Image (spheres, helix red, strand yellow):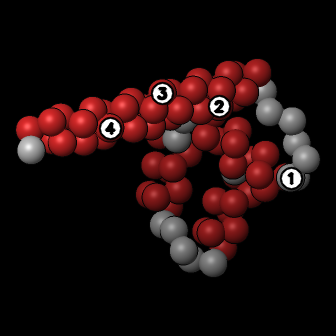
Amino acid sequence: MTNLIAHLKSKNLITDEAQDIILNTTNDSIKETLGRSLKSKNAKYSPAMCSFSVTLQLRTHMFVKCLIIYYYTLQHYENSIQ
């Protein structure tokens, strides 16, 4: 991540203030992910990142499933009214 910020700074794409804000406010997991993506595409993920990924995938799946059920329930209700 530091290399990326240094590169942006050398190209005058970010200011010193922006650099400080990015380094001080960015979450460690985001810094880890950006650093890994810059290093290699075959890098291993930490257990915390794997757990987060699985949790996010399951929650997304449940959300979409609920939306589909809700859609069909509304469709059935609308058909029963007519």
Q: Is residue 7 left or right of residue 28?
A: right
The answer to whether residue 57 of the structure is visible from this angle is yes
Task: Give how far apart the Cα atoms at labels 1 and 3 are.
Answer: 29 Å
Q: Position of residue 82 (x, y in %)?
A: 9, 44
Q: Quadrant of residue 66?
A: top left
User: Dot 4 lies on which element?
Assistant: helix
Going from N to C along the chain, the mark reached first, 1 or 3, is: 1
What residue did someone put label 3 on? 62
Residue plotted at (61% across, 40% down): 30
Going from N to C along the chain, the mark reached first, 4 or 1, is: 1
Residue plotted at (61% across, 68% down): 9
Q: Position of residue 28 (x, y in %)?
A: 61, 33
Mark drawn on residue 72? 4
Going from N to C along the chain, the mark reached first, 4 or 2, is: 2
Task: Give how far apart the Cα atoms at labels 4 and 2 are.
Answer: 29 Å
Q: Quadrant of residue 43?
A: top right
The answer to whether residue 28 of the structure is visible from this angle is no
Q: Nearer the viewer, residue 29 or 15?
A: 29
What residue did someone put label 2 on? 53
